[in-house]
Image (cartoon, grey):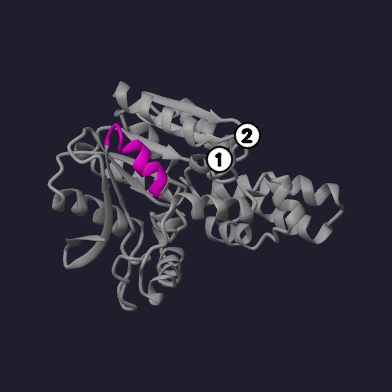
Amino acid sequence: MAYIDVCGKQIYYEEYGKGNSPTLVYIHGGPGESCLTYTYQAQKLGERFHIISFDQYGVFRSDPIPEEENADVKYHVDMIEKMRIALGLNSWIPLGHSFGGMLALVYAHTYPSGTEAVIYDCPMWSALHTARAIAQATLPYFERNNMSEQTAFISEIMKDNISPKDAFYRSLNIKMNEELSRYCHVIEADRYNCYINEHIAEPQVAEDCWGRYIPFRQKLFDSEDFYCDYLPYLADIYKPQLLIVGEYDMTCGKFEQEWFDAHAPNGKTEILAHSAHLSWFEQPQKYTDMITQFVLSV
């Protein structure tokens, strides 16, 4: 396993296609998921490009965040930039999935000189609008089944006066039973586990690594900038931008997609049919091809 020292913190990272250019840096979601599940795609993209994939500070194989230390969105964005410098790279292309899409957008906005282009994979750019996208996807199921308590609970998310934090926490507490999961095209656990077992080697790590995501997530959920609306940042980024969204994704909804189409200079949208949130798993070859074509055009 490879580690790099970033301001005294040990960050786990994987490198593929060394010597090829340009460089893509994969920024995982979750929050707190780790880069483990992206290993197969990193290897495939590494056949054409230089790929850096890493566990964010505080997650899985990277150093845990001390209890007394605050780590908000800006903190993690700054860590990504410090990692680029530590690796000796002049610039790279952030590729952010889900929450990682928020980090990729804020990074590209904050550090334009380090950004060649940016790729958003089913991104979360706004806690409020992601919560509403989830509500819009699930509400018809509860209405159709006359589940009045859940209908009322979710309807609150759509009200104008709700705070982003309250909306987000409500979306986390939507009760996803098996039938609702099928209705929303959520990937079956068995199918996903088969993919993991087939394509990704078991990491040989200490037992305490697996639970590091819990304080990582809580620090983010307690921070103010996690609930900012970053959609306006899209208009300020003049480097090429690619948005990849699964047809049934519940994180980046129609509102966000339309905002991107209307406001992102030099932006391109690709919709992956028959996919939901894990498009790199559900349509692996199409996903690889989309990214490859985009990067070659930059």
Q: Quadrant of the N terminus?
A: bottom left
For the stretch drawn in magenta, the main secondary structure is helix
**Which residue is outermost to the right?**
146
Quickly name the residue at label 2. 274
Quickly name the residue at label 1. 282
Going by the image, does 107 lie left or right of 214? left
Q: Which residue: 29% across, 29% down?
A: 239
Q: Is residue 182 magenta?
A: no
Going by the image, does 60 lie left or right of 192? left
Q: Calculate the distance from the C-alpha at mark 2 to the C-alpha at mark 1.
A: 8 Å
Do the residues under discs 2 and 1 have CB atoms within 8 angstroms?
Answer: yes
Going by the image, does 125 lie left or right of 66? right
- Type of amino acid under label 1: Glu
* Mark 2 or mark 1: whose residue is earlier in sequence: 2
Q: Quadrant of the C terminus?
A: top left
Q: Position of residue 228 (x, y in %)?
A: 44, 52
